[in-house]
Amino acid sequence: MQRILSRQLPTHVGETVRIAGWVHRRRLLKAVTFLIVRDAAGLSQVVVTDPAVRAQVERITEETVVEVTGTVVGNDVAPAGVELTAPVVRLLGPPAAPPPFDLYRPALTASLPTQLDHAPVALRHPLRSAALRVAAASVAGFRATLEARDFVEIHTPKVVASSTESGASVFALDWFGRPAYLAQSPQFYKQLMVGVFERVYEVGPVFRAEPHDTVRHLAQYTSLDAELGFVADHRDVMRVLRDVVAGMLGAVGEKAGDALATLGVEAPEVPAEIPAVHFTEALKIAGAPADEPDLAPAHERALGGWARREHGSDFLFVTGYPMAKRPFYTHPDPARPGYSNGFDLLFRGLELVTGGQRLHRHADYLAALAQRGEPVEPYAGYVDAFRHGMPPHGGFAIGLERFVARLTGAANVREVTAFPRDLHRLTP
């Protein structure tokens, strides 16, 4: 008899079926025992009245892996409106050691550090696993949207010979006696691959050795990167990004609608044209000094509130960041060289995406590095490629965990990360 999942039970009313999963909860009443079995699709209720089977179930601990064969009967108050009766229960492993918290409760009552210390079992809780399903659907939407626009998926090295972000903190390692670093982003490689495929994207880990200990930062996170050639300027990139975010949210609704319902959230609408303000105007809206070089989290929150009030949008583009705060490969605004053809996308008052137009002429790279007092040699393999003809291009990068946290309303990005790596955590 083939195993079926919990969500398939309503189509088998009156039949004898086999399910398998984890003992989610046991309710031991005077005349009947209810066994709740959890699988990847949800919960199944098993009604046990036979005294021998009841005695067996009473000895089983929560999280023990079991197989149950029984008859599917309709019951409006049971999960999915059905339950199994006259069951035969078989253990598929030894009785499980109880986890340090109750997974059957509506929410985990353990502190976040305790949950992270015991992540392999904490992630079994429906709220925690639902967030990971949202992440998976988001990535599927990212890929599908770009594939439909002729982007090619690439895979780039995560061990590199030089830093990507002009000296930002990197994790150093020994590469057969030579210094090397964990990649901060696939930036250099995705630009070079524009010279091959014109439009490329990558989904992969990136590493930042910045000693942040906040609810929005991780030392390793998943970056959704895209780069496209033959752009007029950064606005072409922004239009593609708008469609990508809409595609990601559409895929979440389609593939992870049950997960959203479990989390009690709804995916927002993405405007046909996301409102945009220049950095100088953003400072005024946020009440920041005119000489402020960047937006602080409080400024981003103020801008998020403004976008909601003025445009009914959860999203806002801020364009034209000062060149001094952007990487050396950023293209300046031809009309205002002190500002960039770069942008951030804010989602509900939090920076979600950084992107923009890149330099594409070899001479401009030499000048940009010289202006910042940086030698060319560490970037030679990257910069040299621009001698051989590169089109005007640009791209963006989305932090997956930050996107999911903002979408689901998680207070801490670690709540939506399976095994977070940060300033303090290298295990499990």
Image (spheres, rainbow, N blue to C red):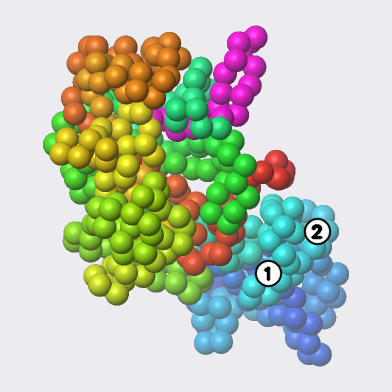
The quadrant of the rendering that contains the C terminus is: top right
Magenta segment boundaries in residue numbering: 170-187
Residue that carries the numbered disc 2 in the rendered image? 96
Residue 409 as seen in the image, left or right of residue 367: right
Q: Quadrant of residue 108?
A: bottom right
Distance CA(mark 2)–CA(mark 1): 19 Å
Image position, residue 322 (x, y; %): 32, 42
Q: Find residue 108 and name its label.
A: 1
Depicted 246 relative to depicted 309: above or below: above
Q: Is residue 305 above or below residue 39?
A: below
Residue 177 image position (x, y, % from top left): 65, 9
Mark 1 neighbour class, 10 Å CA radius: few under 14, some 14 to 19, many 20 or more: some
| Image quarter of residue 32 | bottom right
Is residue 177 inside the magenta stretch?
A: yes
Q: Is residue 4 above or below residue 36?
A: above
- Residue type highlighted by circle 1: Leu
